[in-house]
Image (cartoon, rainbow, N blue to C red):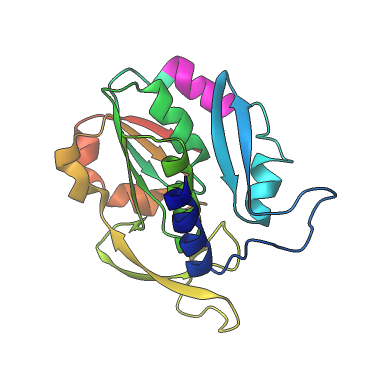
Amino acid sequence: MRVFARYLKKVLNSIGLDLIRLQSQPGRFFPYFLTKEVEGERFRFFIGDSDGQDWYDNGPLSRFWPEMRFMRDSVLSDGDAVLEVGAHHGFATILMSKWIGPNGKIISLEPNLANFEIAKINVQANEIPNVDLRNLAAGEMDSELEMDVSSSNSHVLPPTASSSRLRSKVHCVKLDSFLDFGPTLLKIDVEGFEKSVLDGAVEILKTRPKLLPL
């Protein structure tokens, strides 16, 4: 537990999060851990910023997530190889890791470094062995992208974007670079950049994987 605490403090410092933040809700400070019970699953979840608090503690995903229930009941199968594009804080990643079983596996991409570090904490806190998290974006070609990271719902910046935006560079890869992984499901949540992601997945799409845009 002490090792994990030291790791957590190091990660928080690396992404600019203090262990004590301004109170954003009466009686609740972030960052903090919750025990979540969602769609029949119980797990620990780390709330690392205000967006995470709004979405996963106070917001619509506090107990029910119809899209994930549909995924569990109608899309996922035991042993699936999931290629997740857009992990955010790892909430869906945790649920999928449970529903594909020990024979399943997930490669999960998250371009926003702060989101990636929070998702990594969540995967480690739940001792999930079948998830491989990577701080990458996905697109139609391998390149370096500049992203707006002023919120956790980051997106690619056009060349003409205002210089006042909070920027971060991230490596972008074609999904076809994961062809050998043999994905049976593409779960894509990329804030309107789905076409760009799929344009880089021509060879994977030929294998007829299941598709789930969120």
Residue 7 figure quarter: bottom left
* Residue 114: % across, % down: 50, 61
Q: Is 80 situated left or right of 164 in this image?
A: left
Q: Is residue 71 magenta?
A: yes
Q: Is residue 181 magenta?
A: no
Magenta span main SS:
helix
Q: Is 63 situated left or right of 67 in this image?
A: right
* Residue 164: % across, % down: 60, 82
From what the image shows, is residue 69 above or below residue 146?
above
Q: Residue at x 68, y 55 (%)?
A: 50
From what the image shows, is residue 134 above or below residue 67?
below
* Residue 9: % across, % down: 51, 60
From what the image shows, is residue 81 above or below residue 19?
above
Q: Residue at x 68, y 48 (%)?
A: 53
**Frontmost residue, 94 versus 212:** 94
Q: Residue at x 48, y 71 (%)?
A: 157
Q: Residue at x 51, y 21 (%)?
A: 70
> Can the viewer see residue 154?
yes
Total numbered labels placed on residues in the image? 0
From what the image shows, is residue 121 above or below residue 103?
below
Query: Which span is picked out in magenta?
Result: 66-74
* Residue 162: % across, % down: 57, 81
Q: Is 212 situated left or right of 66 in this image?
A: left
Outermost residue toward the left in this view? 180
